[in-house]
């Protein structure tokens, strides 16, 4: 049994993977089961484990990694599973920006990389032309984004630019792309006693600039999670920063020519751009299932690792190819030549070797902390708080959640 959090087209692609595996051999059968969004799927698995009705595999989003690691008796680390079942499995086969997120201090992979995305910039070429902007050049810096968005507004667009996933894009990835720490202890990789530290001068400046642009809709806040996406697809906003995994949806639903670019950065920051970090999810294996099931899980992960399987998943969904071989195969097949912009996400996460600040985030209760950050960003964008006050409050509230998590997991 494989519990997952993918609906719509992504859910259909996931079910095809399971069906293809089932058809490829006769010993094992993977049964996918949709359990709601990521939080609902993880919560369902935790409750099921207590009643011994848990699945063998559960799809868990990246920011719940620390929470899963803390459930030591419940998880069967993937590197152990593959070793125990004598299935080939090498972290070196995967892109470093992916493996770095899901390995322990010794470099062992704890979960199986499945769907990984990173934020990129999308823009409406038709609106750029109407505003007298070059439709073939994506804005590269935040200053260029602001200037282009002002031209778009002057030409009559309802909003210059917007972003989805406010914390993931404007705090977490912003920090990584400028090689700034989100917290101490290498963003939590160094221990549960990490302390949030993202209320730094550059972050304050960035949020203050967004809030200033918000006043004239040069930037227009569109809400949490993916609520900004339809505004770009309908032609309300000329520039949109969102997940690379929405690329297929944007192409399918937009009636205009779409341009693509990397995440913007502030050009006066030394070392920027660094590399972006991933979102998405991995597959975690839960303990206390019959031994025969684990043989099937290991075979399934071996199947998912095949370059042709990974490449097809990447090409059909917009998620990153998590192995180097899948990336190379997609390139050899001419996918990137036929689909301009599709390689930007890979180029961006591999721009430079990840640092302690750009490896990822491994902080306890980060699902809750992200809600806190979104809450405080809303205070700044609505003018109820200064950027400094909002970020100071986000750090203070977030640190309270970190200390609660640390107290609840004293043996980590």
Image (tube, grey):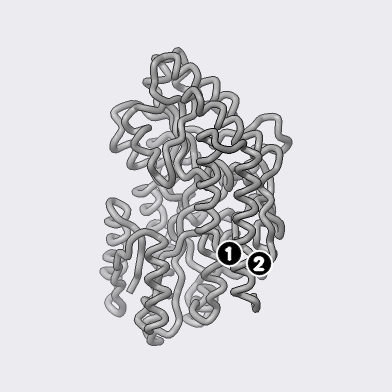
Would residue 176 appear left or right of 315 to someone viewing this image? right
Residue lying furthest front in this view? 384
Would residue 366 appear left or right of 105 to someone viewing this image? left
The reply to whether callout 1 and callout 2 are in contact (CB within 8 Å) is yes
The crowd level at tag 2 (other Cα within 10 Å; few <14, some 14-19, many 20+) is many
Is there any visible trace of residue 66 in the rendered image?
yes
Asked if 223 appears above or below 211 in the picture, the reply is below
Nearest the eye: 215 or 79: 215
Q: Position of residue 230 (x, y in %)?
A: 34, 37
Q: Position of residue 359 (x, y in %)?
A: 63, 54
The crowd level at tag 1 (other Cα within 10 Å; few <14, some 14-19, many 20+) is many
Which part of the image, by quadrant, shows the N terminus? bottom left
Q: Secondary structure at mark 2?
A: loop
Q: Position of residue 383 (x, y in %)?
A: 54, 33
Residue at horizontal 64%, vertical 51%? Answer: 395
- Mark 1 lies on residue: 364
């Amino acid at each position: 049994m494989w519990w997952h959090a993918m609906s719509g087209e992504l859910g259909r692609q996931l079910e095809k993977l399971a069906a293809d595996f089932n058809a490829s051999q006769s010993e094992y059968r993977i049964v996918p089961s949709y359990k709601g969004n990521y939080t609902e799927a993880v919560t369902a698995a935790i409750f099921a484990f207590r009643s011994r009705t848990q699945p063998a595999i559960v799809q868990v989003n990246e920011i719940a990694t620390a929470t899963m690691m803390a459930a030591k008796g419940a998880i069967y680390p993937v590197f152990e599973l593959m070793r125990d079942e004598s299935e080939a499995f090498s972290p070196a086969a995967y892109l470093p920006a992916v493996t770095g997120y899901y390995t322990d201090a010794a470099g062992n992979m704890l979960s199986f990389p499945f769907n990984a995305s990173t934020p990129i910039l999308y823009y409406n070429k038709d609106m750029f032309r109407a505003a007298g902007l070059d439709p073939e050049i994506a804005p590269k810096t935040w200053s260029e984004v602001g200037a282009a968005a002002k031209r778009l507004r002057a030409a009559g667009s309802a909003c210059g630019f917007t972003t989805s996933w406010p914390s993931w894009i404007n705090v977490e990835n912003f920090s990584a792309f400028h090689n700034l720490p989100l917290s101490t202890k290498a963003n939590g990789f160094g221990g549960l006693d990490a302390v949030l530290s993202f209320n730094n001068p550059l972050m304050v400046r960035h949020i203050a600039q967004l809030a200033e642009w918000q006043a004239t809709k040069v930037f227009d806040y569109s809400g949490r999670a993916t609520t900004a996406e339809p505004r770009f697809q309908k032609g309300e906003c000329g520039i949109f920063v969102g997940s690379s995994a929405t690329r297929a949806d944007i192409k399918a639903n937009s009636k205009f020519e779409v341009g693509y670019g990397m995440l913007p950065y502030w050009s006066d920051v030394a070392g920027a751009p660094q590399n972006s970090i991933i979102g998405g999810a991995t597959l975690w294996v839960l303990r206390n299932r019959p031994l025969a099931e684990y043989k099937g899980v290991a075979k399934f992960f071996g199947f998912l690792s095949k370059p042709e399987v990974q490449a097809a998943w990447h090409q059909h969904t917009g998620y990153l190819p998590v192995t180097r071989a899948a990336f190379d195969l997609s390139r050899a097949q001419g996918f990137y030549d036929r689909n301009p912009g599709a390689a930007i996400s890979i180029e961006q996460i591999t721009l430079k070797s990840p640092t302690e600040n750009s490896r990822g985030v491994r902080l306890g209760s980060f699902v809750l902390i992200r809600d806190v950050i979104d809450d405080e960003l809303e205070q700044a964008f609505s003018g109820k708080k200064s950027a400094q006050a909002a970020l100071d409050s986000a750090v203070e509230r977030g640190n309270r959640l970190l200390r609660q998590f640390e107290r609840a997991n004293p043996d980590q």
